[in-house]
Each structure stands twice: as C-alpha cells, then as structure tokens.
Image (spheres, rainbow, N blue to C red):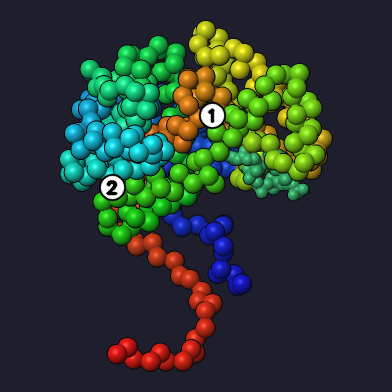
Amino acid sequence: MDDLERPGLEGVIAARTRLSHVDGAAGRLVIAGYPLEDLAGVVSFEALTHLLWTGDLPTSEEEASLRHALAPHRALSPAVAALLTAACAAGAPPMDAARMAVGALSLGADEAGAAAAVLGALPAIVGGYERLRRGGALVTPVGPLGTAEALLFAIDGRTPHPERARALDTYLVTVSDHGLNASTFAARVVASTGSGLVDAVVAAIGALKGPLHGGAPGPALRMVLEIGAAERAEAAIAERLARGERLMGFGHRIYRVRDPRADVLRAAVDRLAASGHGHPDLHALAAAVEAEALRQLAAHKPDRVLQTNVEFATALLLHELDLPDDLFTAVFAVGRAAGWTAHIAEQRETGKLIRPASRYVGPLDRARPEAAR
Ligand code: COA
C-alpha cells in the first residue's frame, strides 16, 4: 500500500464545505459558523435548514416563508401513500419504506422544488409509516406545522405538546449535519454526476441505513433496558466489560474529548423530564447506567477518553418521545436531510465529478477464452 491508497478514504479530503466542521480533538461541532450549543434548543429546524441552504439564519419572515413552502408537501401524494401502505403490508423496516417513498417524490416535483419536497414530505413519510404500522390511517396536518410537530402529528393524529415537539426539534437540529459522513458523501457522489436531488437523497438514505452509520441507538437503548434497575448497573457493566464487550453509546472515532451532540441532547432530555413528559423511571435508570459506565470505562481504559456519545443520548430522547427503536434511524434521516440537500447544492457548485481510482490487484495475463459458438 502506498501513500495514495487509503482504505475507507480515511484522512482524505474529498470536498470543501461551508456547512459544518467536526473538530474531534476539541470536541466541537460548528454548523455554518455557529457552535452546535448555540443552535440546538435555540433555533428551529426550519431556521437551521435556512442556515444550511443560504448561509444565514432567517429573519422571522423568511422562516415563516420556508414553513409555508414545506407545508403542502406534508400531504402525501396517492403514489407515496400507496407505496407506504404496500411497504407496511410487507412488514418492511422503516428505512426501506422511507427509501421507496422518497424515491417516488420525483414524480411530483421539478428539480427546483425537489429540496422543499423532500424536507416537507419526509416527516410525513416517517411519521405516517409509523401510524400505518400501528393500524391507523394516514393523516395530514392543517397549517404550516414545523418539521418536528409534523412528524409527531403524522404518528398521533393530533398536534403534539409543545415540549415534546421542542425536544424532537432539538434532536433534528443536532443531527442536521456532520461533515463528510458516509451518507452525505454518498449524496455528493450522486450529485456530482449531474443526477437529480431525489436520486442523491435516496442514495444517502441507503447509506444511513447501515449499522455502522445510522443504526446504533437501538442497541444503546436495549443495553439500558436489559440492565433494568440502577442497583444492577455496577455488576451488569462489569460483566459486559469482563466479557470484552463494548458499551453501546460510549466512545467515538472522531471525538476524542466529548461528543458535543450528546451534551445538547442530554439537556433536551432533562428539560423534557422536568416538564412532566417522558418516563421519569427510565430517565433515572439511564442516568445511573451512564454514570456507572463512565466510572468503569475510566478504570477499564485509563489511557482513553471514553465519553457518552450521540447514540446514547439519542436513544434516551427518542424513547422518551415514545418512538420505537426501529424508527430511530428514519427519524435521524429527517434531520440529516437538511444537511444532505445543502451538500447536494454545494457539490453542484463545483461541477466536478467525484471519481476516485482503484488499484487493480487481479491477474493480468490469463489465457484467452475460446470463442463462443
Ligand atoms: N466500551 C468498551 N470499550 C471501548 C468502548 C466502549 N464503548 N469504546 C472503545 N473501547 C475500547 C476498545 O475496546 C479498545 O480497546 P483495546 O485497545 O483493548 O482493543 C480501545 O477502547 C480503543 O478504543 P478507540 O480507539 O476509541 O475505538 P475506535 O475509535 O476504534 O472506536 C467506537 C470508536 C465508537 C467504534 C467505539 O468507541 C465503540 O465501539 N463504541 C460503542 C458503539 C457505539 O456507541 N457506537 C456509536 C458511535 S457514535
């Protein structure tokens, strides 16, 4: 292997972006110039989308205008509704349903309106699919609901309590963009070929579905539920570490100090619990498991900084919102779609096809095959 060969493209800089900066050494995530902590729980997901799409936070008129542009897309077309119904009948996982339904959005939208169509329809697709799985019929909200409200409305069929919507909104802002992660890169590769926005988002959904990218919060939640009681945490965690298992929701490949997303999500979980929503028992159990895990990880790997990562906090927050763990990745897609669509536009500005090279390692001199008769 020479200097040009980098498995997984690790360390390769494949794009310039104004959208987000992941500073692993300092434990900082900067989105379009703002530290995450100044955005999550402070500005709405629509304001954040405007920031990613235009480079600036919106005025209140601009934010209202974006909400109005997204609102018509919350009403799913008959084609999308039929696909979701068929996916539900087949027992498809939510990410498969989302991929199929988002693919059908190209039927109704021209390229200029495709980003609004995706951002507008995704919460209705993800929430609507969950409603279908619970045996309900698809519902369309009246008026320009925010993305978090629209997703919860699509599940429950009623306007959510503001604290629940606020908690989900904070989550969507928190996961909206994160440098050149695998799904964002997939979207940029497709965009670089001159293909359509919907094509690029479908590719991104396919990449996000994989367990190495968007699929980890479920196991983190299951670990907490399996431990089951605060007094069991010490022994249960010690057993896991003694077996050589990794504790789900701790440690990070890039963040070596702390994962800033975990901090803002934990604040959102605390706020939700303080407002009387969510599940106080689980909240207390998760806090006990987290504290014990951090204590034992520090002793287990004294030379490493193993802190709570975004997946642990995500699992807790989405569970507190009564979302099933197999829906978590699809909800992640709703937030990350803001980043995908912004990266697609940014990639198109370069006009450069992404086309890395491969090193051929097969044989070069095999015998010529006989001509077919
Ligand atoms: N629990 C127990 N041990 C852990 C650990 C965890 N969560 N995370 C790392 N370690 C240990 C590793 O086993 C390894 O030990 P070794 O040197 O004896 O083999 C050592 O710490 C090296 O860790 P590090 O270099 O930080 O791991 P990495 O960069 O290869 O992996 C993760 C990063 C995220 C893959 C890893 O921390 C992990 O598997 N975490 C649990 C899964 C998870 O939460 N994933 C979601 C990430 S957002």
Looking at the rendered structure, the secondary structure element under dot 1 is: helix
Residue 298 drawn at (x, y percent)? 78, 34
Q: Quadrant of the N terminus?
A: bottom right
Q: Nearer the viewer, residue 147 or 215?
A: 215
Ligand 1 within 8 Å, label 2 CB: no
Q: Which of the 4 quarters of the picture holds residue 209?
A: top left
Residue 68 badge: none
* Residue 325 versus residue 101 in the image, above or below: above
Circle 2 residues within 10 Å: few <14, some 14–19, many ≥20: many
Residue 125 drawn at (x, y percent)? 31, 32
Q: Which residue is mark 1?
A: 314
Q: Which residue is mark 2?
A: 197
Residue drawn at x 79%, y 32% is 238
Which badge, 2 or 1, comes first in the chain's sequence?
Answer: 2
* Residue 200 versus residue 309 in the image, above or below: below
Residue 311 drawn at (x, y percent)? 57, 34
Looking at the rendered structure, the secondary structure element under dot 2 is: helix
Q: Nearer the viewer, mark 2 or mark 1?
A: 1
